[in-house]
Structures are given as structure tokens and as C-alpha cells.
Amino acid sequence: MEDYRRRQQGDVSNGPKPRKPVLELLWFFAIAACIKFLLIPSYRSTDFEVHRHWLALTHSLPLSQWYFDETSQWTLDYPPFFAYFERFLSIFANIVDPQIVDLQKGLDYSSNTVIYFQRITVIVSDLCLVYGIFRLTRSLDPIKRKLVWVLVVWSPALVIVDHLHFQYNGFLLGMLLISLSYLEEGRDLMGGFAFAVLLCFKHLFAVAAPVYFVYLLRHYCRGGFVRGFRRLTIMGSVVVAVFAAAYGPFIYHGQIQQVIRRMFPFGRGLCHAYWAPNFWVFYILLDKGLSILLRKLGFSVKIPTASFTSGLVGDSSPFSVLPQITPLITFVLVLLALSPCLIKAFKDPLPRMITRWVAYAYTCGFVFGWHVHEKASLHFVIPLAVVAVKSLEDARHFFLLSIVSCYSLFPLLFEAQEYPIKVLLLLLHSSLMWLGFSAQFNKGESVKQATSKTKRRHIQTKVSTTSTGEPFRIRFIEKAYLFGLLVVEIWAQFFHPFILGSKFPFVPLMLISIYCSLGVMYSWIWQLRWILRPPPN
Amino acid sequence: MEKVKESKVTKNKDDLDNHDDACWWSIHKGVKAIFLSISLFALLVRVAVSLHPYSGAGIPPKYGDYEAQRHWMEITINLPAKDWYQNSTTNDLSYWGLDYPPLTAYQSYIHGLFLKLFDPESVSLFTSRGYESYFGKLLMRWTVLSSDVLIFFPAVLYFVLAYSSNNSSFRKSDLAWQIAILLINPCLILIDHGHFQYNCISLGLTVGAIAAICTDKDLVGSFLFTLALNHKQMSAYFAPAFFSHLLGKCMRRRNPIAEVLKLGLVVLGTFAIIWLPYLHSVDAVLQVLSRLAPFERGLYEDYVANFWCTTSVLIKWKRFFSVKLLKFLSFTATLSTCLPSMIQQIRFPSKQGFLHGLLCSSFSFYLFSFQVHEKSVLLPLLPASMLALDEPSLFIHFLHYALLSMFPLIVRDKLVQAYLAIYALTFLIINASNKGQRKGRAFQSARVLFGFFLFCSLVLHVVYLVVRPPERYPFLFEAVIMLLCFSQFTFLAVFSNIKQWTLSKDVQPMDKQKLN
């Protein structure tokens, strides 16, 4: 027996060589792809039909009619590069099943071919995310790198939004990560180029544009007036070239106004039917509270026609006491929230800080923005995953934030069939994070010690006693908050329907919004504090 | 840098685990924490597979195993226990009559109550036949998931803890690998959560029994195995191994007869409790027994890769031989092929040998017993997956052909997409660890040959899906798949028998001491 065992161990030492990082990353990707492939028959939102319609639209119509077509209510409202992307995919769609790209016959088409085709395009386009995360983590040490891969490539929020609900965020976020990786390497021109391309895919990413602008101005265009001006011209022409490639054809057809109108539908109101967990939740609550209070005191307060709780969203003011919020106000607020970060970037443009700054910018956009969708939390959670391995504080913050943001996506999947899936995704993610961060921060020291040969003999005793760094542990307040999350979920899912029946149907969603917005606000303040006063390294 | 680490790993096994391994995260926390995350993942895979169609979905009038299980729930919650196995006006045995032992009936009863609570229509007598709905499917799927979580998962944890306490030389990442292999068994997941059955219960009870016996709790072990036997009579595939190992162990004790009596009492007592509703008369017992042994269903079903079905290409067993003779032939063939492994265990009982014995006896049953089904391959696969750390190549080789042998069934159930994804997933997981890449000597020497067979199996998948068979031989590809699988299974059965006998030399002295 012993002999047998020894033989096996002997095999290890001259056994397989360590694999290349790319292969390892692809392993993570492949595992995720298998799960995503298994999940194909699950629920899909109307976004699926939206993207199918865009395939048909870009395939059947000439470019000049893309932004005018009204065959379906799902008109094209993404920037031109995304339309080109759909045009590219439609070539394959046409080969797979011509009915997918048929403008009329394809409406609400839901055969297996179209489902598998579109779902697989999302899975494959995630390779862009994989490349982005590979570039961004190249310089990290192997353990940290793997942890980041787990956080990003196996992100439950991405699975929920992209592969169940249906969207192409993975591939767009991949482009953002590519851009960030260039900036971190100091290759600003490429970084700016990638970001410009991203903006022409999805304009919602423009929230970080001020940060990019200030950072590139100060980091890329430095070194005296002449050199700076020359570089500014180079950067400017690159960006203009990208935008020209995207919008040029539409300018040529004289349709640029129509394109812009489609891309920015401001009539949609401050909040989505389900409130994204952000600052405005508190504003609405305050308004409600005040109106009830004033009515109690005898003032006559008129009840708004479009109420948030009824789920109707319109142009009229939904507030009864507090002033109306306009897009301009939200815009100014976002800029105001961004300003500390912009000042920091202006004073001292450090490449190692850019990921945090960009993530912060998206957080501000999420917290104060106009008509924010809960899916937008991906924009800062994914970049923050890269930062999470840097220090214990970061890890703790990320642990909380990613759970909250993933939980806030739960209402996207409201059918019974997907309930176990979303719960398991979140639990699996939390347990992997917990194991990974523990391995990272509790053992980090002992592994380092082991590398020095002199101490190797004492490892057995040392490992158990020495953990010089503080171990990864969740604080009491955080534990209490996460426990509260559980209570909210149990109430919303089980007790509310049983106790109150169909009364107050908006309460469960409202509870989730309010509770998650607490977490998001905490994250925003935490990030702001970190940016104002970065802890000494 | 990475190479330096690699060499160090082998020296400081447990604490500085292999960071280049995919199981790197498992280094810090204990086995239970690792088990928790792997089981969450395994559960996710199961839920994902359960989104896919079940057997006989939307195919009246008989539907498939899904309808059978639902029908049993309908029968058990609406009729008294004594009528469950009796043909009557309310219980038409020709429509999916209950043909599993009483424990399955009790399980159906409990699940039936669960369904009745949320969707009473789905289990109402008569009117629910062929009942299919979105919510009904979910509830049924959740009964399998919950059985899996409540029985199979704890059993695996028990086994891994027992196994790792026996062999302290295992590294944590190896254990993580072993847990993953046991929990993400593609065949079991596809049959239970895709096709729709409750194998996880009987197999889980068997795993629990094995774990108990590995920790020398023989009475608990025999109790659990009796439960498994009473859930699915197919668990009898393992009976020779349990019998011989326990007998061998008892004979080494101070008072062999008392030990055997104790075990016998536990087994009989368990049987008595489970069969209580039918013990009032001999007729009732015989009636249930006749339901459990469906000899009228024939020697084999479809194209199963066993001896009888494969040789029927040459000898038409079913046509030229009476059922009685065939029963006798298959019985003697099964028993005689089990015998070597049984003798080994009676003479030199050991834990390692026990696991091999389980594999050998279940292989004999699969290859030679009466009325074998494609799904029966799950039974030999279970001990093979428990041996995965010691015999990685045997397990990996077996898994390929076990999957292939089920492929025609999968295609019939419209589970091809799930099959492909889970096939890929399993081999990604197996190859994540260094264990998965290492091959045994026997397999190393004939690598080219095995590579060729593997290539054939992959080609066969494609051919089976794409090419239409010639009109004269509509089942040509099934037959080819069966031939290939049979040849591999026979080889593996012989290999595991030899392995078990060679084991006794090095294992023996150590285990002898432990037993006394």
C-alpha cells in the first residue's frame, strides 16, 4: 500500500508541467460556457426578441433605414457599432435559419434554432471578456490572478443578465477591461481608442468619459505645451476617427438627429418600473413620507397621477411634495459626485488608480443617474473585481458589494423555474469568494515564507501559528447586513404572498430596492473615501 | 517561478498545496468547506440539466419514466398500502404498475403528498394520467433535487470523510477532486435530472453503506444497504461484494457466528419493517415479489452493452431458448463471474479490496444478469468513481464508454444538448487536477489502442446524430455502439478483477492488524 502511494506521489514530481496561464483561463471560461450552455432552455426576457429583431432589421434593411424602422416596438436604440455587430451576426443567423433574420415572419420567432443561435453568440462573445481580464491580470501573481478570474469569468451577475435575461454585457465589459489594461500599462493611446470604440457600441458607458478625458489629458498629453498639444491632437484624431467610422454613414445620409433621438429616450422617467437600488429610492421614500405627514397635519397634498408604486412611468411629475427631478439635475449631480475623483486624476494621474476611478465613475452614474437600470451595476462590479485582490479592505468591500449587486438583479428572473438557479449562483459565488479570499489573505504570508529555503523545514509548525496579516473575516455589521438580505428575501418570497396575499404587490420589490440601495450607497461612500484618502501602501 | 512551486508542493503536501491546480482555493479551509462549494456547484449543474426535457415528454399514451414516477405518487397517496401492488379496478398494473420494492412506494407517497399540497390536480386518481404542466414539471424536478441533497450528498460527504481518515496521505486538492468526481457524475445527473428517476436515493444509500463499512460500522452499513436494496432491487448488483466482505470480516473476529447472526438480524429486521404492510399473508408477499422480478420483459432491453445482447448478434437467445433456461444460464454466468472477487474478499477482506469487489460484482451483473437496462451502467460506475483516486485511468476510461452506452437513450429523450455540455464539463473537471492526467501502467502501455477506441467513440457520437442508418439495418449504429462498449466493459471487468487479486498482496498485512 505504502509503496503504491509512493509511486503515485513520485509521479507528481516529474508529472505534468504547470500549464500556461492562457490555458488555465480558458479552462475557467470553458467550465462557465458548459454551465451557460446547459442553461439555454431557461427563461429569457423581451431583450431576446429585441436582439433578434435587430438581427432581422440590420440584415433585411439598408443602413439608411436602420434607425427609422418601426416594424416592431423594439426599435434600434444602441449606437452604430452595435448595429454593425448585429449585422455581422446576422450573416451566420441567415445560414443557420433564414427565418431568424426575416423582418416580418421572424417576429416573436422562438424555435430551438433561434434560441440556441442567439444564446451561443452571447457565450462566444464572452471571449472578449476573457481576453480583457487576461490582459488586465497578466502582471498579477498566479494565485491572485486565478481569484480575479473566478470573480469575473464566473460572475453570477453576468450569468443572470447575459445568459438568462439575455444581453451582451460580457463582451462590452470585456472591451472596457481591455481599455483599462492598456491604461494600466501606460499605453494611453490604445486605451483611449478602445474606450472610444466601446462608446460606439453602447453609449451608457459614457459615464466614465469625464474620468477618461481628465486622465488622458494629464497623463498622455503631458510634457510641455508643444508635446502635449501634439499628443492631444493625436488622441483627438483617433477618437474622431472612431466616431467617424461609427456615425459617418449616418451623417452621410443626414440622419444623425434621428440616431441621437433613438439613443437618448429621455421620456422614460427617473426610475425604471423596478427601482434600481440607488439614491433616488431614498428621495422617493422621503417624498412619500412627507406627503403622508403633511396630509396628517391637514395640508392638502394632491396625489400624483403617475405613481412609482403603481408601476406606471410617465412624463408627469411623480412627486407630491419634493421638487421634480429633471435629467439635467441628475446630470449635474453625477458630475458633482465625480468631481473629487476628477480633481485627483487631474492632480496626480496614476495608472494604477485608473481602474478604481473608472469604477467609481460608474458607481456615481448608477447612484445618481437618470432612468438607471439595475443591470448597470455590472459596470462597476466587474472592474472592481480586479481591485478586490489588492488589499484586505478591498476584498471585504467587494465581498459585500458583489453579493448586494447580484441580489438586486434577482427581480429580473421572476419565474419559479429560475428561482433555484439564481439562488445557487449567488450562494456559489459567495462561497467561492469566501474560500478564495481566505486562501489569499490567510495563507498569503505563509506561502511567502515558504519560498525562502531556509525556513522550509519549519513550515509545518509555522503555518498553523503565523498569519502575520489580518485574516479575511467579515465584520459584525456586514454580517448583520447580509443576514438582513436573507430576511428580506424570505419575506418577499414566502411570507409576503402567504400573509398579505395579493395586497401591496409592490412591497417585495420596494423592499429589495431599499435594502440593496443601502449597500450600494455604502459602497459609493467607501469608494469615495478610498479615492480621497488612499491608504498608504 | 511556477516550476519552483510545483516541486515544493510534493514535499509539503497538505499545507502548501498545488497552486497551479484548479483546486488552489481549497488549501485553507477544511474538507467540509470545500464540500460545500463543490456541492453548490453540483447542485447548479443538476438544476440546469433539469431545465431540459424528461423522458416521454408530450408522447402519449404511455409517456415515459416521468409519467411512471408521477403515476406511482398518484397510486400511493390515493390507495391503501396493501393495494399498491395488486391489480384492481383502481390500480391498473398494465399502466406503469409499481415494480420497485416498498421503499420506493413510500418515497412516492411522501413526494405525492408534496405534490398534492401545491398542485392537487397532478396526483388525482385517474384524471391525472399524462398530466404535464410547467409547474407540475418543476415540482417533480424538485422532488428529485431534494432527494439528491438529502441522501446522496450527505452520503458522499460521509464517504469522503471516512476515506480521508483512512488514508492520511491524501492532499486536500485530491479530496476536492474526488468529491467533484462523485458529485458531478454525468450519467447519474442525466438519468436522474434529465431522463427522470430516483437513482440518487438507492445509490446514495449504497454510498452511505460503503462509508459505514469503511469506518468499521458494519451494522449501520448493512442497515443502509438493506434500505438501498429495498428502494431499487438493482442494488443487488452490489450484494455479493457486501456479503463476501462482511463475511470475510466476521470470520476474522473472535466469535464469527455471533457476528454473522448480528448482521443477519439487522438485515432481516430492516426487511421486516419495510415489508410490514405485506407480511399478513404469503400471497401478498409473493404478489409483491412477482412485481419486482419482471421476467416477462425479456433477457435484455433495447441495445444494452452486455453479454446477452451483444452475442445475440450471433445467437438469437430470445428465440431459441426458453425463459426458464435463460434464467438459469444468466444466473450461473453472473454468479460464476462474481465468484473470484467474492473469494478474494472472504479470504482477505480489506477496504481497498471491498471497493474493487463492488466494481467487479456490479460488472458481472451488468454483463451477465437477466433484464439489464442501459441505465444499469450507473451501478458499476458508482464504485469506479469511488476508486477514482486510486485508479484514475480505469475510471476515466470507463466513464467515456458508460456515457457512450447511454447515448441512444439520451437521443430518444432529446437530451443531446445537456449530454454534450455535461460530457465536456466532466472532462474539464477531471483534467483540472494532475490526477486526471496521469494514467495507470496498464493503460499507458496500450495508449495508442485506447486512443483509437476513444476516437471511435467520439466519431460514433457524430455518426449517430448525423448519418441515417441503411434501411435494412435501422439499428446498425446502436449495434456498433453496443459492440464497442461491450468490448471495453469486458476489458475493464477483467482488469478490475485482476487488480483486486494483485491488491491482496500489498494491502493484506496492514489491514489485518487494523481488524484485530
Image (spheres, coloured by chain):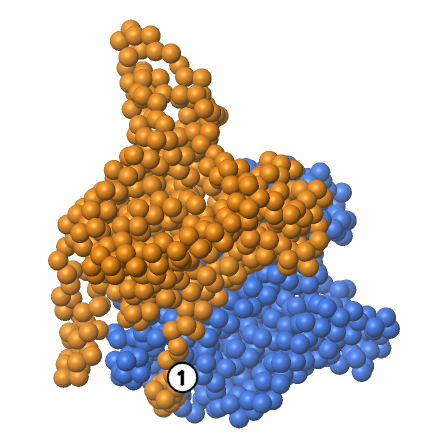
Chain colours: A orange, B blue
Q: Chain of mark 1?
A: A
Does any portion of residue B397 appear in the rendered image?
yes
Which image quarter: residue A38?
bottom right
Residue in the foreground of this view, choosing between B228 and A187: A187
> Residue B98 location in percent, x, y?
67, 53
Name the residue at 48% across, 87% down: B440
- The local crowd at label 1, few if under 14, some if 14 to 19, many if 20 or more residues have their Cα within 10 Å, is some
Does residue A330 sit above or below A49 in this rendering? above
Does residue B23 sit above or below A94 in this rendering? below
Q: Secondary structure at mark 1?
A: loop
Does any portion of residue B270 appear in the rendered image?
no
Does residue B215 sit above or below B93 in this rendering? below
> Residue B307 location in percent, x, y?
70, 79
Left or right of residue B95, residue A85 in this image? left
Which image quarter: residue A130?
bottom left
Query: Where is the C terminus of chain B found, in terms of image quarters?
Result: bottom left
Name the residue at 62% across, 68% down: B376
Residue in the foreground of this view, choosing between A394 and A265: A265
Name the residue at 61% across, 47% down: A63
Q: Amino acid at mark 1?
A: Pro
Name the residue at 46% across, 37% down: A264
Which image quarter: residue B221?
bottom left
Q: Residue reaching furthest right?
A: B472
Location of mark 1 (residue): A16
